Image (cartoon, coloured by chain):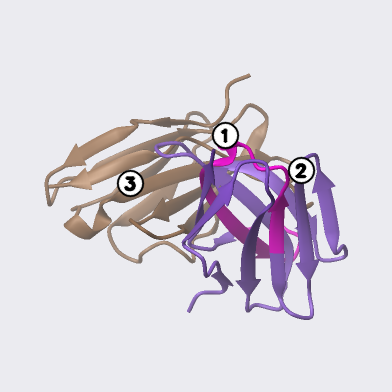
Chain colours: A purple, B brown
Amino acid sequence: DQQVKQNSPSLSVQEGRISILNCDYTNSMFDYFLWYKKYPAEGPTFLISISSIKDKNEDGRFTVFLNKSAKHLSLHIVPSQPGDSAVYFCAAKSGGGADGLTFGKGTHLIIQP
Amino acid sequence: NAGVMQNPRHLVRRRGQEARLRCSPMKGHSHVYWYRQLPEEGLKFMVYLQKENIIDESGMPKERFSAEFPKEGPSILRIQQVVRGDSAAYFCASSPSHAGLNTEAFFGQGTRLTVV
């Protein structure tokens, strides 16, 4: 039973346009959400996070939106750049503690020139 | 300022052998997490350790798998009598000693285990 779902295995976006990656979750106890970026043969690197008390967090070209009522979050990348091509994982945890993360299956973002 | 170090990067084992995966957390980090990624899947939480203590092993298979984080030295994930289904990428992550606030974990580059 997947508690964090990324329903798009891949997404292709033109360079300079906006990339929107989506994530849904089922566990209402989740209160902290993170996005990680992963290149082949490397470990995930942290990108941006959001606490459930917020509905938006912005860091440079990256913005994460959280809709708690819909149990949905999205990552916006604008403008998209070739170096953004990677697999993006949505992750969540509950309780504000140091517990392990629950990950989605990832979305492979491909930025086309 | 080294990141999370995992070794070996690649490990090949025959069925029935033991696999030992090592993880040195970032300096100042006392929380270590192990995750497994099967092909075409996301990362699955296995175990969370602090120095000399297993805090949460709810994601760890009950048999053949064990983990430790001794007072001195790296964290070790041990898989005994490996089977083909254990072939996966194993990632270690660490977070600061004051984790408990909403801090992110930093990942190592992973160990790719292949069981032949």
Residue corresponding to mark 1: A83
Magenta stretch encompasses residue B70: no
In the image, residue A59 above or below residue B45: above
Report the Cα–Cα distance between label 2 and label 1.
33 Å
Q: Are marks 3 and 1 on the same chain?
A: no
In the image, taking residue A102 as reference, residue A75 lies left or right, namely right
Magenta stretch encompasses residue A90: yes
Three-letter code for the amino acid on which mark 3 is drawn: Arg
Kindly indicate the quadrant of the structure image that contains residue A101: bottom right
Q: Residue at x 55, y 66 (%)?
A: A6
Q: Is residue B24 visible?
A: yes
Mark 3 touching mark 1, by CB under 8 A? no
Q: Which element is circle 1 on?
A: helix
Q: Which element is circle 3 on?
A: strand
In the image, residue A39 above or below residue A28: above
Q: Position of residue A7 (x, y in %)?
A: 52, 70
- Name the chain letter of the residue that bears numbered label 1: A
Q: Position of residue B62 (x, y in %)?
A: 35, 66
In the image, taking residue A51 as reference, residue B104 lies left or right, namely left
Q: Is B12 in front, or is B27?
A: B12
Residue corresponding to mark 3: B78
Q: Residue at x 63, y 74 (%)?
A: A25
Tell me the tag on residue B98. 2
Report the Cα–Cα distance between label 3 and label 2.
27 Å
Report the Cα–Cα distance between label 3 and label 1.
36 Å
In the image, residue B109 above or below residue A62: above
Please tell me how crowded label 2 is: few (under 14), some (14-19), or many (20+) other residues with Cα within 10 Å: some
- Name the chain letter of the residue that bears numbered label 3: B
**Pair 3/1: label in front:** 1
Q: Which residues are magenta?
A: A74-99
Q: Residue at x 51, y 29 (%)?
A: B72
Q: Position of residue B112 (x, y in %)?
A: 32, 41
